Image (cartoon, rainbow, N blue to C red):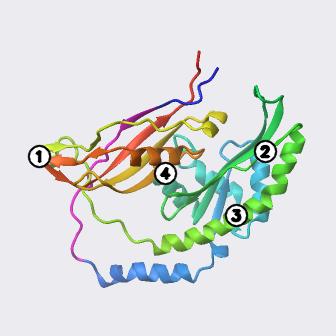
Amino acid sequence: MRSQSFTTNRLFLTQSREGAKTQRRSSLSSFAPLLLCVLALNFPLAAQRIAILTPDKAESSRTFAGSLTEKTSLHVLDSDLSEVAFRSVSLTDSFNLTRDEAKLIGAAIGCDYFIVTRSATQRRSSFQRKEYYEAFAAVHIFSSRSGRMVRWLLPRFEAAKPYTAAKALDISIPTIAAEMDAALLRINKAEIDEPPLPAMEEPPEAASPLAKGFRAPIPFRRIKPEYTEIAGLFDITATVEITVDLDAAGTILRTEITRWAGYGLDESVEKTVRAMNWRPAERNGKPLPMRFLLRYNFKKVEKN
């Protein structure tokens, strides 16, 4: 049998950013953010360019993507050209993207948002019920501007016959498209209005002068995030990364997922990190606030 819960984790501290920010800013660079904001507010969401991608190249995924393209009110770019640009970016896992990878994909395609999706109909069985079929579509929606996965959807439909389950998924596509359009409308405005992150020190490189006398932040008690039931159902292997802002007292000020898996694993990581008590970073015995990265690896394993 397969286990329903298994995860390993390790702390991965980001490296400090090199150099200080320059104090001189031209009048043009000061004006640029305001100009960008005004242009974005006057550029309707329907005119925003999106790409819908099917990395697994399965016929069922392409059929779902084609139907989603027909039902959305957004401007969807040519799928063949988008796929070519997508494949030009070197990726470890197309469904487990980091923020930097998502930005590279968006820049390569030339889109404002992109959607990575896969769809299939598969046979299921359990002790509680006899054999049945499930049709599903995993929909990962990314912002090219921020690199975030801004929305994750997993419509699922069960039936005694595969055709019936697939038909139910097909019927739901207009509703899925409407939910996606509404979500992107909210997200588009939220990203425009989002304030910049406050400056905060990050862990230094091991050989740098700042590493002398430095002690990294650590939890007093480590807790393993739950490998969720839905992740187990879909045999998900993924990595989730989360950025944490910790103050000098060891209080978490902010967390943000920066590599996404979906299937409830992102929420599991954030909940776990916030539940832990932290010892703050120190330099020469003095506590200091710090921004650092945590990495959690998830894998479903066989249970003897």
Observer-side mark, 2 or 1, equals 1
Q: Amino acid at mark 4?
A: Glu
Magenta span of residues: 8-24
Magenta segment main secondary structure = loop
Label 3 crowding class (10 Å Cα cut-off): few <14, some 14-19, many 20+?
Answer: some
Q: Between disc 1 and disc 4, whose residue precedes?
A: 4
List x then y, in percent, for residue 79.
70, 57
Label 1 crowding class (10 Å Cα cut-off): few <14, some 14-19, many 20+?
Answer: few
Q: Relative to 175, does residue 226 appear above or below in the rendering?
A: above
Q: Amino acid at mark 1?
A: Gly
Q: Residue at x 49, y 74 (%)?
A: 192
Q: Between disc 4 and disc 3, whose residue precedes?
A: 4
Are the residues tagged 4 and 2 within 8 Å (C-beta)? no
Tell me the quarter of the picture where residue 251 sits.
bottom left
Q: Relative to 151, does residue 39 appear above or below in the rendering?
A: below
* Circle 1 residue: 285
Dot label at residue 179: 3
Dot label at residue 60: 2
Q: Between disc 4 and disc 2, whose residue precedes?
A: 2
Dot label at residue 101: 4
What secondary structure is marked by label 2?
helix
Q: Quadrant of the N terminus?
A: top right
Dot label at residue 31: none
Are the residues tagged 3 and 2 within 8 Å (C-beta)? no
Task: Kindly report the distance in space between the C-alpha atoms of the residues bearing marks 3 and 2.
Answer: 21 Å
Q: Residue at x 78, y 64 (%)?
A: 71
Task: Kindly report the distance in space between the C-alpha atoms of the residues bearing marks 4 and 3.
Answer: 25 Å
Are the residues tagged 3 and 1 within 8 Å (C-beta)? no
What secondary structure is marked by label 4?
helix
